[in-house]
Amino acid sequence: MKHLKTLCAVLVLATMALYSFQINAQNSTIEKMHQQYTEMINTGNPANLEILYAKDASIRNSDGSMVAGLDNIKAQYNATFASGKFNIVLETNEVTPLDKDYMFVSGSFVYNKIDEPTMALAGEFVNTLKNEKGTWKIVKSYRYLTNQNHAAIVNNLYQAFAKGDIPAALATMNSKVVWNEAEGNALAVGNPYIGPNAVLQGVFAKLPVDFEGFYLSNIKLHEMSNNQVLATLRYNAISKHNGKKMDAQAAHLWTVKDGKIVAFQQYVDTKQLDEMMQK
């Protein structure tokens, strides 16, 4: 009986040791993967993508968009790295083994563009990992924002507009964005503009026709309730119709949802705009 008890105790200890070893091995694997991912983001080098993601992997981005397949994931990261330099800090919250071939990993992240440090985004992720011939790879990844930094998204539009990068400005908008120009403004005849292309054709493309050197100045952003951002600013330009200089007070009310702009309402000194249009 004594020997049986001893044997049982040994088996229990061996099982506990094996379980502890497996947990430590999994944690070490996750730590290494997160180091590789952090290195990829911070260096802007996509070389680790094939190490980290399975060929049939999919990503739900924090803005709600989906990307499926390794080739499309590569294209997304390459486009991101081409737009600037970024850094990210990851923290692992929980590792949950499902069986020998699958596990869940959850955690948090803080992600920002280096040349726009106030645009940091904080969020959480849940990854499903698959064991492919002894190598763990991400097969599904879900990202969610936990900070509602809507002003950062609006600022991205203003920054892109200032650089003349209209595609980047349009990319901040939801595919069904509702855009309204101030009443009394000549551009208001097209209200509401639905979708980025309508905004491009009905608003952005017409500005160079009527104005020279159109730019926005003194932009101040204010986070509001109900997912809204209020921007106070000024319009500056020279009329191509009569040479008058414009320095008009304006306000923009933006609505943001799931990381994209879904609505815009303009308020502006329409009397001054009307004077700029007179020939």
Image (spheres, helix red, strand yellow):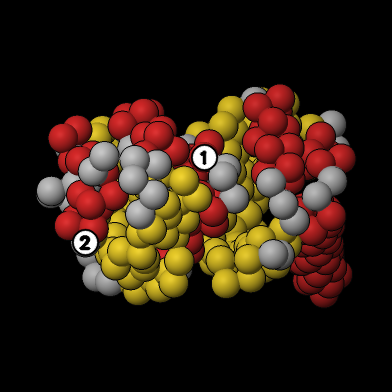
How packed mark 1 is, by other alpha carbons closer than 10 Å (few <14, some 14-19, many 20 or more), is some
Please indicate whether residue 239 sits to the left or right of residue 28 in the image: left
Q: Which of the two residues, 228 or 206, is positioned nearer the viewer here?
A: 206
* Mark 1 or 2: the one toward you: 2
User: Which residue is under mark 2?
Assistant: 269
Asked if residue 24 is positioned above or below residue 98 in the image, the reply reads below
Q: Earlier in the sequence, mark 1 or mark 2?
A: 1
Q: CA distance from mark 1 to mark 2?
A: 24 Å
x, y percent for residue 116: 63, 66
Q: Quadrant of residue 5?
A: bottom right
Q: Residue at x 72, y 33 (%)?
A: 74
Q: Residue at x 56, y 66 (%)?
A: 119
| Residue 3: mark | none
Amino acid type at image mark 1: Ile
x, y percent for residue 226: 23, 64
| Residue 166: mark | 1
